[in-house]
Amino acid sequence: MASRDLLTLPLLVVPHVLFPGSRLQLTLTQPESIELLEEVIQRDSTFVVISEKPNQELFPVGTTARVVESFRDATVMTITVVGVQRVSLLSYRHQGARLVGQCRYAVDQDDAVPPPLTEEAWALGSELFGAVAQGDRRALPQNATGLSYWIAAHVPLALAVRQELLEISSTRARLAKEISLMRTLLDGFRAEHSG
């Protein structure tokens, strides 16, 4: 692997999973995190949003992000970030009070997603989103990859499940897993509201 394939990027460790194309609002109170984000904003650069395991080791996959909104007062910074691209974390180190990671872009496998799989995921996502959030179903992306990330970001799932979805490198496999999860959630939702 050529060195140009590697990226050295600052890491922001948060208890959330960010997906490409999705937005996430974060409230930062640690001075190191605030300082890092002020520098990122000033340089208009990207950084990696990544989560940690219960043993405090970092997960192997995160998402590069850009800050699209920020607000700062004396001790708190609130930012909204948008996910750009999945990255594999190869290694990381402390650089002063910050974490910096050696990363490589994690590209989805070029697998053909059968239209019925995308259609089922869209229908289930639309039903679940409408039932849970009373949201506008037209907000769901039409393309398979965008839809898989949208579902992972918007369907109510535990952090570990979201992380598992982020680590799946195949859109087809991610959608299949999400369909199974959404069926289970909808079955529970229907049972809860039928009696």
Image (cartoon, helix red, strand yellow):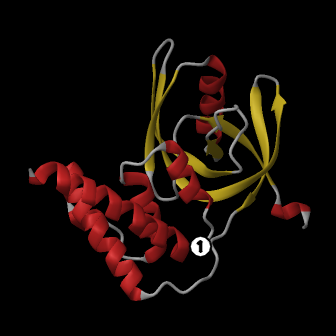
Q: 134 or 64, which is in the foreground?
A: 134
Q: Is residue 107 left or right of residue 92?
A: left
Q: Is residue 53 left or right of residue 181?
A: right
Q: 179 or 154, which is in the foreground?
A: 179
- Count of residue discs: 1
Could you say which quadrant of the image residue 110 lies in?
bottom right
Instruction: Give coordinates of residue 86: x percent, y percent.
Output: 62, 58
Task: Work out whether 16 lies above or below 119.
Answer: above
Task: Work out whether 106 lies above or below 162.
Answer: below
Q: Which residue is rendered at x = 71% and y = 40% of the image?
A: 58
Instruction: Give coordinates of residue 52: x percent, y percent.
Output: 65, 37
Mark 1 lies on a secondary structure that is loop
Instruction: Give coordinates of residue 101: x percent, y percent.
Output: 78, 43
Q: Which residue is rendered at x = 22% and y = 64% of the image?
A: 127
Which residue is situated farthest in the top direction here?
74
Which residue lies under the disc numbered 1?
Answer: 170
Task: Work out whether 115 lies above or below 48.
Answer: below
Q: Is residue 5 left or right of residue 79?
A: right
Q: Which residue is rendered at x = 85% and y = 63% of the image?
A: 4
